[in-house]
Structures are given as C-alpha cells and as structure tokens.
Image (cartoon, rainbow, N blue to C red):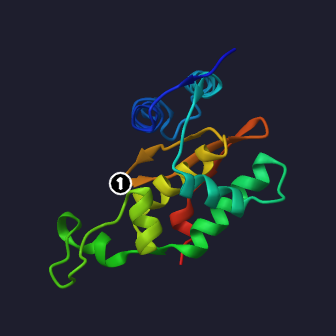
Amino acid sequence: MKKKILSLALALVMITVVLPVAVAADDNTEMKSKILEIFATVELQYDEEITSLAKSITESISSDYEKAKAIYAWVADNVWYDYDCRDAPSGHNPHRLDACCYTTTFEVLEHKRTVCEGYTNLTTSLLHSIGIPTVQPAGHGHTWNEAYVDGRWIIMDTSHSSN
C-alpha cells in the first residue's frame, strides 16, 4: 500500500491531540489499533536535525524496544526538569529574563530544560522520526508517552527519570 505524506503539523495534531484522548490511562486496545493503522498509512516527515539525532542515538541498535530505551535515556540524561517554570504562575517567572516554559521540540533541544510536556514532545518527535508509533496520554496535570515497540505498547515517562 502506498503511503500518503501528510504535513508534520496535521499528523502531529491527529496523533498527539485527537487520538490519545481515548487512550489516557486506560488500555484502550481498539483506539491503539486505530493509531497503528494510521502509522501504517501515513509517512511523517521530520526535520533533518530531529531525524539525525534519533539515528545517532539509536545507531547500531536493531530492536525498536532497545531504540525506545536509548531515546528515553538520552532525553532523561540531556534535559533538565525546569522547576522554576513549573512553580511559576501561568508558566512565567518574573525573576528570570528567560522565564517561560520551553515545551516545543526545538525549544527543548536548544535550552535543555522543560516540564513534562516538553519531555513528551521531544520524545515523541525522536521516536516518530525513526518510525516508532507513539501517543501522548495526559491526566492529572501530567503527560507522558506510550510507544508501540516489538508488538506491544510500553509506557515512557522521561520527566520522571530526568536530571
């Protein structure tokens, strides 16, 4: 089957906003099956920097599970949790000039600090760029990743293992 190419923005909205709503903390097998169908028919195109980084992290690793573990470890080891941002009202800290929460993939890569949303976005981008289906469930003011590797869904919460 020929894959359709969608814009990154549209694909990320479908995969990270619309579909995960039903995934949340429950094991929703039917919804996760739909997510896998989308990944089978859509080709995501990522920025070369993201793809290059993901490939360098997973170089010489063959299983998707081990690739996911390597990306998990890299994100947790290279990005710091931003407590100043988390504790500031509305994500703004008036005592810092750079007082905002960095949550997009590129902001997180540049500043190397974020809150759970940024960890999740970076992890999603890295995993997607090497073809690993990933969703971003959210609940109780927190977000994390679930990735489909080697025939099963695994939960990944890089913010809990971060520096």
The residue at the far left in this view is 94
Q: Is residue 14 above or below residue 97?
A: above
The residue at the far top in this view is 1
Q: Amino acid at mark 1?
A: Gly
The residue at the far bottom in this view is 95
Q: From the viewer's perspective, is 21 left or right of 94?
A: right
Q: Nearer the viewer, residue 163 or 129?
A: 129
Which x, y percent locates residue 151? 77, 35
State the residue at coordinates (54%, 67%).
160
Which x, y percent locates residue 19? 46, 29
Q: Nearer the viewer, residue 152 or 9?
A: 9
Q: Nearer the viewer, residue 3 or 131?
A: 3
State the residue at coordinates (51%, 50%).
47
Callout 1 secondary element: loop
Q: From the viewer's perspective, is 126 left or right of 122?
A: right
Q: Is residue 128 above or below residue 104?
A: above
Badge 1 is on which residue? 141
State the residue at coordinates (27%, 73%).
87
Q: How many numbered circles are shown?
A: 1
Q: Where is residue 73, by image quadrant?
A: bottom right
Q: Is residue 141 above or below residue 97?
A: above
State the residue at coordinates (61%, 29%).
39
Which x, y percent locates residue 101? 30, 67
Q: Where is residue 147, by image quadrant?
A: top right
Q: From the viewer's perspective, is 82 left or right of 29?
A: left
- Density class for disc 1 (Cα within 10 Å; few <14, some 14-19, many ≥20) is few
Q: Is residue 109 above or below residue 2?
A: below
- Image quarter where the N terminus lies is top right
Q: Where is residue 26, by image quadrant?
A: top right
Which x, y percent locates residue 142? 41, 55
